[in-house]
Amino acid sequence: MLICGTVPIKDFPLTPGEVKTKRESLIINDLEIPCTQGTAALISAALATTEHLNVPPPQALIVGDNGEGKGSRLLYEYLIKNISELSPAVLVLHYCLPVIGLMKRLCESIEKCSKKPIMIADASSMYVAKAAGLATKFDIFTPDSCEMAFLADPDATHPAYISRHLFDTDITQAAELVTDAYRNKSAARLLLIKGAIDYVVKDGKILDTIVEPDIPELEAIGGTGDTITGMVSAFTYAELELHEAAIIAARANRMAGKYAQATPATRIPEIISQLPTVFEEYLCEWSGVCMV
């Protein structure tokens, strides 16, 4: 599994390698990244999951980008040049400056891989995949409710530019948004829509909704959407079915929030630290994946 994204550290060099945890930070090739939110939170949740499942830890490709885009372009170019050699089973694209031309080139390079990886996108990588008309190349998108409205809008190239009427769309109208997104070919094969209600959608059909445990405080904690994507990626890498990986990740995230007794002031490492306990107590029940 290869997880790619930027961190808001201007001079952080383009760094590929295996990741490990150190208290509330990540270490990649002896460089340290604080686990606050964003790509670092995604990687941390994926790492907690692979450790429990006893599968190889994720590889990462990380670069600093403070919004100017230089780091993002370095990341794209590295992947375009090396993706065939890297040949990941699962490719996860996260925070990166949306550059339509570079995403198109990357997808062209991926098509040349001996075996196409399972492709997962969240955040700005999901935005550019949709804007470039490449959504159907992806296996999993993990939008929140606002991002779902963006996917449903045939004209928007960024969530900030969705049609005004979609700003007022209630996520309980998810079925309508899903229908529009798939009609417009703006959705991946599977969607995990994250929010007060989590929806798991495959090929335009809502397969499941997850509402329990109801932990509204999670909505106020930056990074809890990233942790879901990290778990989905790791469960997919462990060869669970896509919809099963999504359902378990949504349930585990809520349960971790419950165990952490989450408040709006809770930090994302406190949520991630509960995942081993959640997996130990519930994973066998949820999936049949029992660790001996």
Image: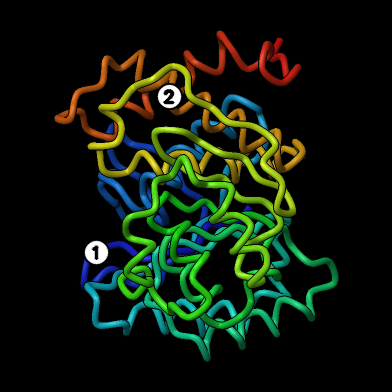
Percent x, y of residue 98: 42, 78
Tell me the mark number nearer the camera, choosing from 2 and 1: 2
The amino acid type found where label 2 is placed reads Arg
Q: Quadrant of residue 118?
A: bottom right
| Residue at (29% x, 36% y) in the render | 219
Q: Farthest right residue?
A: 114
| Residue at (50% x, 43% y) in the render | 230
- Which residue is at the front of the view, 166 or 249? 166
Q: Farthest left residue?
A: 265
Placement of the C terminus among the 4 image quadrants: top right
The amino acid type found where label 1 is placed reads Pro
Mark 2 secondary-structure assignment: helix
Per the image, the residue denoted by label 2 is 254
- Cα separation, mark 2 vs mark 1, equals 27 Å
Q: Quadrant of residue 89?
A: bottom right
Give the mark nearest the N terminus, 2 or 1: 1
Q: Farthest bottom residue?
A: 101
| Residue at (59% x, 41% y) in the render | 232
* Number of marks drawn: 2
**Disc number for residue 68:** none
Percent x, y of residue 147: 42, 59
Mark 1 secondary-structure assignment: loop
Horizontal side of 59 relative to 12 (left or right) equals: right
94 w.r.t. 271: above or below:
below
Horizontal side of 253 relative to 109 (left or right) equals: left
- Which residue is at the front of the view, 89 or 216? 216
Percent x, y of residue 48: 49, 31
Q: Quadrant of residue 71?
A: bottom left
Horizontal side of 203 relative to 103 (left or right) equals: right
Percent x, y of residue 286: 66, 17
Per the image, the residue denoted by label 1 is 8
